[in-house]
Image: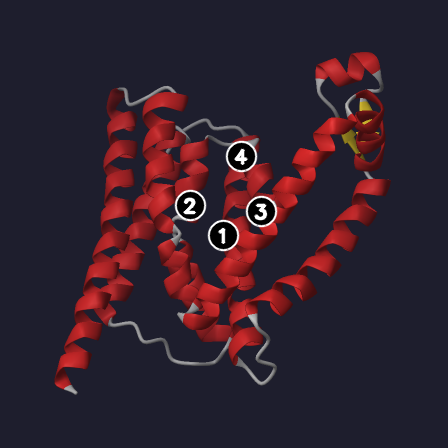
Amino acid sequence: IGLNLLSLSLVPLSLTMIIRACSPLSTALLQTVLMRQKQDIAWREWLCMCVGVFCASAVVVAQSGGLHGGASKTFYFGVAMSVASLFSGALDFVFKGVLGTGSVKLNAMDTTCYMAWPVALFTAALGSVLSKPVSTSWAAHFAPRMTDLEVFRRLWETNPAVFKWVILSGLLAFIYNTFVTFMIVKLSPATTAFAGNFNKAATILIALLILEQGISGSRGLVVLFAVMGNITAFTFYNVLRNRRKQRQVDSK
């Protein structure tokens, strides 16, 4: 989550989402390597996922200004953080799959709880020590750099009512992560990753057409067709997979 938020501050939303739309391939690869099990994926389905990744790469090249573009180092760092976020999310899915289906066999609630506590303690320790730049308005009233602990203390002094929304968002996040873990155990990490692609497709189109500068020029057309190609490739992956599963059921 942290890497994803960092990438959102460095590159356009549509670019971040198109990279994260490649999560079925990264999850399937890590599942194959780490769980040491052959994936139930036909070669046509692998091909569809590879085409989707190729389209995502085309978006990165187009938004960087082309093959000889002059994008800043910040842009490429944001792309690297998006890719790191992609594989971190895939690793999280695979790890939850191992805990839920391996020798431990934890249920979704236990898995979410046991993973939440170390993450909360680790991020709280870092947030209490590391200071970072704050917004201009906060810098004018308090300090140009603050730790997360100082931000929480100042927020408690100025508007303590906002913490009820913080608690509510944490509760909703816990429920969502428990549901995702349940889906990973019942289906598979790769299938759950693909299921999350539908909201990404809508977010990409909304970001391109409304939130960002829209489609203009030759590079804009490349981005549009690459986005559509990415969405189509992973959609075909699902269609081919469902047809193959249905044929297997009919043959029994």
Tell me the distance, in whole angstroms, between the alpha carbons under discs 2 and 1: 7 Å
Vertical arrangement, residue 44 with respect to residue 251, above or below = above
| Residue designated by label 1 | 86
| Residue designated by label 3 | 172
- Marked residue nearer the N-terminal end (4 or 1): 4
| Residue designated by label 4 | 8
Disc 4, disc 1: CB below 8 Å?
no
Vertical arrangement, residue 59 with respect to residue 179, above or below = above
- Marked residue nearer the N-terminal end (1 or 3): 1
Disc 2, disc 1: CB below 8 Å?
yes
4 vs 3, front mark: 3
Which three-letter amino acid code belongs to the residue tagged 3? Leu
x 38%, y 36%: residue: 203
- Marked residue nearer the N-terminal end (2 or 4): 4
Crowd band around label 1 with a 10 angstrom C-alpha radius: few (<14), some (14–19), many (20+): many
Q: Disc 2 on helix, strand or loop?
A: helix
Q: Position of residue 142 (x, y in %)?
A: 84, 18
Q: Quadrant of residue 63?
A: top left
x 41%, y 23%: residue: 211
Tell me the distance, in whole angstroms, between the alpha carbons under discs 1 and 3: 22 Å
Which three-letter amino acid code belongs to the residue tagged 1? Leu
Tell me the distance, in whole angstroms, between the alpha carbons under discs 4 and 1: 13 Å
- Marked residue nearer the N-terminal end (4 or 3): 4
1 vs 3, front mark: 3
Q: Disc 4 on helix, strand or loop?
A: helix
Q: Position of residue 97 (x, y in %)?
A: 51, 71
| Apparent side of residue 202 relative to residue 168 in the rendered image (left or right) | left
| Residue designated by label 2 | 19
